[in-house]
Amino acid sequence: MQEKDIEQKLHKGVKDTKSGALCLKFESPGFNGVPDRMILLPGEKVIFVETKKPGEKERARQKYVHGLFRALGFEVYSTVDNPEYVQEILNRCKEVIEVEKLCPTQLSTILHRQDNQ
């Protein structure tokens, strides 16, 4: 399994929540070490995810940056390198959506309109 397979599974899983959540590739020119993915959930919740191919570890800079993000109060999932860990993140996303008692229909309707333009 490659890193791109892990990212695709995560992206598809977030989309399948049908909540309007977004799983975006996260790049920050000039600031190295940011996580690979940023999940934007309804209710102003952001989760960062660092994907890796199985057996690969984070570099020192990535560990440092992930620590900064955690210190700011963000959830960061590090070294996501298997489908089980992806499922754990998806379960967390679903939990956030349920706890917030959000109405995903409104956001989904807006997104659906944008897709059809």
Image (cartoon, helix red, strand yellow):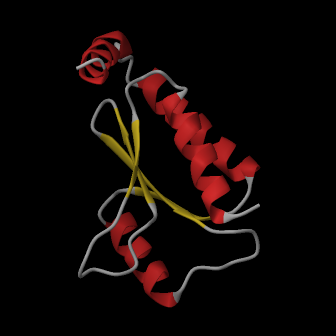
Give residue 56's quadrant in the image: bottom right
Please state the horizontal and vertical placement of residue 31, each as a whole percent of the image. Answer: 27, 80
Q: Residue at x 34, y 74 (%)?
A: 68
State the residue lying farthest toward the front: 117
Q: Quadrant of the N terminus?
A: bottom right
Q: Quadrant of the C terminus?
A: top left
Q: 65 or 12: nearer the eye? A: 12
Please state the horizontal and vertical placement of residue 4, each as a whole percent of the image. Answer: 61, 59
Q: Residue at x 32, y 17 (%)?
A: 112
State the residue lying farthest toward the bottom: 60
- 95, above or below 77, in the image: above
Q: Is residue 15 left or right of residue 102?
A: right
- 91, above or below 52, in the image: above
Please state the horizontal and vertical placement of residue 80, each as a whole percent of the image. Answer: 63, 61
Give residue 69's quadrant in the image: bottom left
Question: Does the image show residue 92?
Answer: no
Q: Residue at x 39, y 33 (%)?
A: 21
Q: 112 or 66: nearer the eye? A: 112
Please state the horizontal and vertical placement of residue 87, each as a whole percent of the image. Answer: 67, 42
Q: Residue at x 46, y 79 (%)?
A: 62
Q: Is residue 17 left or right of residue 55?
A: left
Instruction: State the count of labels.
Output: 0
